[in-house]
């Protein structure tokens, strides 16, 4: 087809990224991100809100305390893991769809 053997078009032979990301430190969500949510839960549960505390709350109630744009249980995964990993509090969200 008229191409010479060994001819390489304008492709790069070695694919190197323009930006090298340092992944040595794991990403931790900032406490500021969940500050309002934690304050609302502390206000609701008072002195009980401490390490080892387990909260079981319906999704409808949690949406009133800690509003989200997406009204689904999975929009709280970050808050659930933050509470568990950093404060030792287990947050269980009950949904009518996932009983």
Image (cartoon, rainbow, N blue to C red):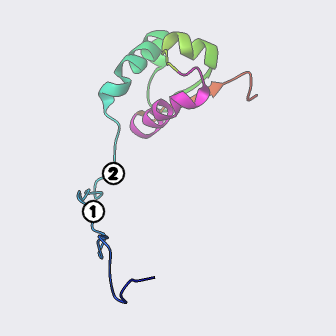
Q: Quadrant of the C terminus?
A: top right
Q: Quadrant of residue 31?
A: top left
Residue, disc 2: 26
Specify whether 89 is left or right of 2.
Answer: right
Q: Nearer the viewer, mark 2 or mark 1?
A: 1
Image x and y of residue 29, in percent: 35, 37
Image x and y of residue 58, in percent: 64, 18
Q: Nearer the viewer, residue 82 or 7?
A: 7
Q: Main secondary structure of the magenta part?
A: helix
2 and 1 marks in contact (CB < 8 Å) = no
**Residues in magenta, as a range:** 70-86
The residue at 52%/28% (across/down) is: 76
Q: Residue furthest bottom?
A: 5
Q: Nearer the viewer, residue 60 or 86?
A: 60
Disc with the residue nearer the chain's start (2 vs 1):
1
Image x and y of residue 18, in percent: 23, 59
Q: Which element type, helix, strand or loop, lies under badge 2?
A: loop
Q: Quadrant of residue 12?
A: bottom left
> Is residue 3 shown in magenta?
no
Give the crowd class for mark 2: few <14, some 14-19, many >=20 residues within 10 Å: few
Number of numbered discs visible in the structure rendering: 2
> Is residue 81 shown in magenta?
yes
Q: Which mark is residue 17?
A: 1
Marks 2 and 1 sit apart, C-alpha to C-alpha, by 21 Å
Q: Which element type, helix, strand or loop, lies under badge 1?
A: loop
Specify whether 67 is left or right of 74.
Answer: left
Q: Nearer the viewer, residue 2 or 37?
A: 2
Taking 82 as reference, is 14 above or below it? below
């Amino acid at each position: 087809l008229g191409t010479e053997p060994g001819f390489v078009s304008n492709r790069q032979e070695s694919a190197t990224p323009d930006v090298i990301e340092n992944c040595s430190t794991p990403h931790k969500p900032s406490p500021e991100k969940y500050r309002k949510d934690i304050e609302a839960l502390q206000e609701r549960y008072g002195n009980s809100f401490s390490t080892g505390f387990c909260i079981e709350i319906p999704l409808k109630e949690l949406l009133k305390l800690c509003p989200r744009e997406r009204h689904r249980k999975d929009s709280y995964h970050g808050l659930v893991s933050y509470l568990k990993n950093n404060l030792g509090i287990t947050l269980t969200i009950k949904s009518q769809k996932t009983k």
